[in-house]
Amino acid sequence: MARERTFVMVKPDGVQRGLVGEVVGRLERRGLKIVAMKMLWIDRDLAERHYQEHTGKPFFEPLISYITSGPVVAMVVEGDSAIKVVRSMLGKTDPKEASPGTIRGDFALFTGRNVVHGSDSPESAKREISLFFDEGEIFDYRRIDEEWLYED
Ligand code: IDP
Ligand code: MG
């Protein structure tokens, strides 16, 4: 069993469209555990740091405006293989290519308005979690259904 933590964010369009509960509900029902969560309005500095790998790309400026355009809901999500599982639940970056049943495949049409973010690797997860959360904001607890969710 590989317990992992990943960083998930409902982007400004997801918040404006009332999809916070939908996203959180899907993660919870899957058996993933929310171990930290907050609403914040990302400023330019944090946006540029979060998306540093995309610096200089043609979509960088629109991406920074998008992600700073309204409040977001940021989370740390824990579970077995959480990084891969969350990415598969989000669907492809371009929602037109995302399978129905995924969040982007069910709720979005445009890459630049794709509702959710999830870390793409253990290194990104670690980096992104520490950008948004202090250690004291992340909680270690057992969910009552873990006994039935986990095989061992
Ligand atoms: P990801 O969010 O699926 O990891 P990345 O390639 O890391 O996708 O891109 C980060 C975010 O930048 C995407 O979720 C999307 O909002 C935006 N983005 C990526 N590529 C484009 C593009 O070609 N046009 C507009 N926005 C883009
Ligand atoms: Mg990415």
Image: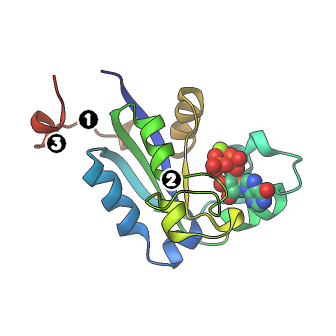
| Mark 3 vs 2, N-terminal side | 2
Q: Which residue is mark 2?
A: 90
Residue 30 percent location from the top left of the image = 29, 48
Crowding at label 1, few (<14), some or many (≥20) Cα neighbours within 10 Å? few
The secondary structure type at the circle numbered 1 is: loop
Residue at 79% across, 45% down: 54
Using the image as rendered, state which of residue 88 and residue 41 is in the foreground: 88
Q: Which residue is mark 3?
A: 143
97, above or below 142, in the image: below
Residue 6 percent location from the top left of the image = 46, 38
Please, which colouring scheme is shown?
rainbow
**Label 2 C-beta lies within 8 Å of the nearest ligand 1 atom:** yes
Residue at 50% across, 78% down: 17
Q: Which residue is mark 1?
A: 140
Residue at 58% across, 69% down: 108
**Label 3 C-beta lies within 8 Å of the nearest ligand 1 atom:** no
Amino acid type, residue under disc 1 in the picture: Asp
Of the two numbered discs 2 and 1 in the rendering, the one whose residue sits closer to the viewer: 2
Using the image as rendered, state which of residue 3 and residue 45 is in the foreground: 3
Q: CA distance from mark 1 to mark 3?
A: 10 Å
**Left or right of residue 33: residue 101:** right
Q: CA distance from mark 2 to mark 1?
A: 25 Å
Amino acid type, residue under disc 2 in the picture: Leu
